[in-house]
Image: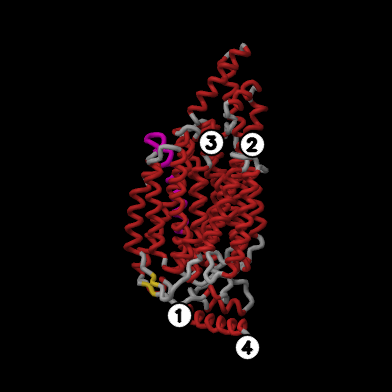
Amino acid sequence: MSTRGDGAVAAAAAHQAQADAAKSRKSWGETLSRRRIVLVLISVMLGMLLSALDQTIVGTALPKIVQTFPNGVEHYVWVTTGYLLAAAASMPIWGKLSDAYGRKPFYAAGMIIFVIGSALSGQAHTMTELIVFRAFQGLGAGAMMPISQAIIGDVFPPAQRAKFMGVLMSVFGFAMILGPLLGGWITDNFSWRWVFYVNLPVGIVAIAFCLWALPAHVATHKHRLDYAGSALLVAAAVPLLLGFSWAGVTYPWLSWPVIGAWIFSAAAWVAFFRWEMRASEPVINPRLFADRVFSISAAASALQNAAMFGAIMFVPLFVQIVQGHSATNSGVVLMPMMFAAIAASIGAGQFMARTGRYKWLVVAGFAAAALGAYMLSRMTMDSGRSALWLDTAIMGLGLGVAMSAFTTIVQNQYPVHRLGEVSASLQFFRLIGSTVGLAVFGSVLNNRFTANLTRNVPSPVVHGLKAAGLDNANALGSSQAQQAIARIVTSTAQALGRPLTALAALVEHGLRLSLEQAISTLFVVSTVIGLVGLAVVIFLPEVPLRTSYGVEELQDRADEGLDVGIVLDASDTKPATGAE
C-alpha cells in the first residue's frame, strides 16, 4: 500500500477514536448543579453588561469627547474603528483558545484587558493615545463577546439555549438603554473621562464573579496552536478594515493607499484560507462555509450590524447637532429602540425555545429593521420626539430578533466542543460588518454634507469653510470649529456689506440643513443594506433546534440528509475534557 494510502487509513482510525471520545464528553449543563448554573449565568451577564455599557456610553459621549483634543473631529470615527479592528482581529483566536484550553482563563483575561484599557482611555491626553487605548480595550472585547455566548452553549442545548440567549441579549439591550442616558449625563455634568472610569467598578465585580463562579476545563491532550493562521488572519483583516476606514475620509476611494490596502488584504485572505485548509486546528475553519446555515447567518449578521451602527452612532449626532439638544436628550431618543430590542430579543428566544423554528421570525426581523431605517431617513430638524421614538422603536424590534437568534441558529449546527470556534467566527463577521458599515456611513455622511453645503450656504462662506478645512460634518460639534465658523461669517459679512445677524442665522440654518440631508441619505443606505439582508435570510435553511448537547443527534440528522454542520470533519471531534 502507498504511503498516501497508509496516511489515509491512519487518519480514518484516529478520526474514529476521536469521534468515540467526543460522544462521551459531558457539557457543563450535564455536570453542574442548578445553583452553579445560575452563578455561571450571572457571571456571563456581568461580562455582557460590562462590554455593552462601554459601547453605548462612549457612542453617546463621543461628539463631546473629540472636542477636547486638537483636530479631534478629524479622527471621530477612529475612536470606534480602532476598537472594532482590535476586537475583530483577535476574536477568532480567543474563541479557538477557549475551545482548546477552556472558557474560564480567557474570559477572565479578556475582562482584565478590557478594564485596564478603560482606565488608560480615561487617562488619554491626546487623540492618538485615546485611539490606541480604545484598541487595547477592543482586544479584551474580542474575548468577552464570543466566549460569553459559547458559555451559554456549554450550559444549555439549543432548544433551551434560544430562551436564555434572548435573556442574555436583553442585558445588552438594557445596557443600550442605560448607556446613552448615563453617557449623556456624565458628559453634561462631569468630565468625559468618567465615561471610561465607570467601567472599573463593574469590571472588578465581573472579574471576581468569573474567577469564583466559572468551572475550569482541563484539556486531556496537547493542542497545536495555529500561529501562522493567526498571523495571516490579522494580516488579512486589518488592511481590509483600514482601507474602508480611510476611503472617502482620509483618502479618496480610488487612491493608492486604499486600493493598496485592499490588494494586500486580498492576497493575505487567499494565503490564509490556503493555509487553514491544511492546518490541523485552524483558527477559522474554511469548511464552515460549506454549511449553508453558517454562511448565510454570517452574511446576514454582518449586514444587520452594518445597519445597526448607523442608528447607534449617527442618531445622537442628529439629535445633538441638527436639532441642538443635549447629549442626555440624544440618549433619551434611543431608549425606545432599546426597549423594543429587549422585548423582541426575549420574545424571539421564547418562541424559538417552544417551537424550535426560527426562519420566518428572522425574516420578519429584517423587514422591521429595514422599515425603521427608511422611516429614520425621513427625519428633519423639526421632527418631534414622538416621531423619532416610533422610528427607532420599529428598528429596535428588528434588531432585537437578530441579536440573539443567529448565535443559537449557528450553534445548533455544531457539537459543544466547537462552540467557541463557531461563536467567535460568527462574531468576527458581525464586527467586519460593523466596521465596514461605520466606515461607509462616515464617508457617505461627509461626502453628502460637503455637496449639500454648496446648495444651502452662501458660496463665499463655503469657500471660507473649505479653506479652513471645516467642510466636514463632524466639525460642527467642535467648539473650536464653531468659533472659526463665526470668524468666517463675520469677515464675509464685512466683505459683502451684509448684516451680520442675518448672515449668521442663514449660515447656521444651512449647516444644520446640510447635515440633516446627509444623515437622511445615510439612512437610505441603511435601508438598502436591510433589504439586502432580507433577501439573504430568505434563503436561510431551517433546521429544528436540537434537544441534546452532543454529536449523536447531529449525526442522525446528517444520515437523514438534513443540512447540518460538518460534523464528520476531524476538527469536529476531540478527546473529552472534564469540568470542575
Which numbered disc, 3 or 1, marks the residue that appears first in the sequence? 1
Q: Nearer the viewer, residue 11 or 287?
A: 11
Q: Is residue 319 found inside the magenta-colored segment of the image? A: no
* Mark closest to the chain's N terminus, 2 or 1: 1
Q: Which residue is mark 2?
A: 447
Q: Name the quadrant containing residue 287.
A: bottom right
The residue beneath circle 3 is 74
The quarter of the rendered structure image containing the N terminus is: bottom right
Could you say whether the residue bearing mark 1 is in a helix, strand or loop?
helix
N-terminal of the pair, mark 4 or mark 3, is: 4
- At mark 2, the secondary structure is helix
Disc 4 packing (10 Å; few <14; some 14–19; many ≥20)? few
Distance of label 2 from label 1 (alpha carbons): 58 Å
What residue range appears in magenta?
167-192
Q: Residue 441: image x %, image y %?
A: 60, 43
N-term-proximal mark, 4 vs 1: 4
Q: Quick one: SS at disc 4?
A: loop
Circles 4 and 1 in contact, beta carbons < 8 Å: no
Name the spot of residue 428 as percent of width and height, x first: 54, 57
Please tell me which residue lies in front, 278 or 352. 278
Q: Which residue is label 4 attached to?
A: 1
- What secondary structure is the magenta-colored segment mainly? helix
Labelled disc at residue 24 = 1
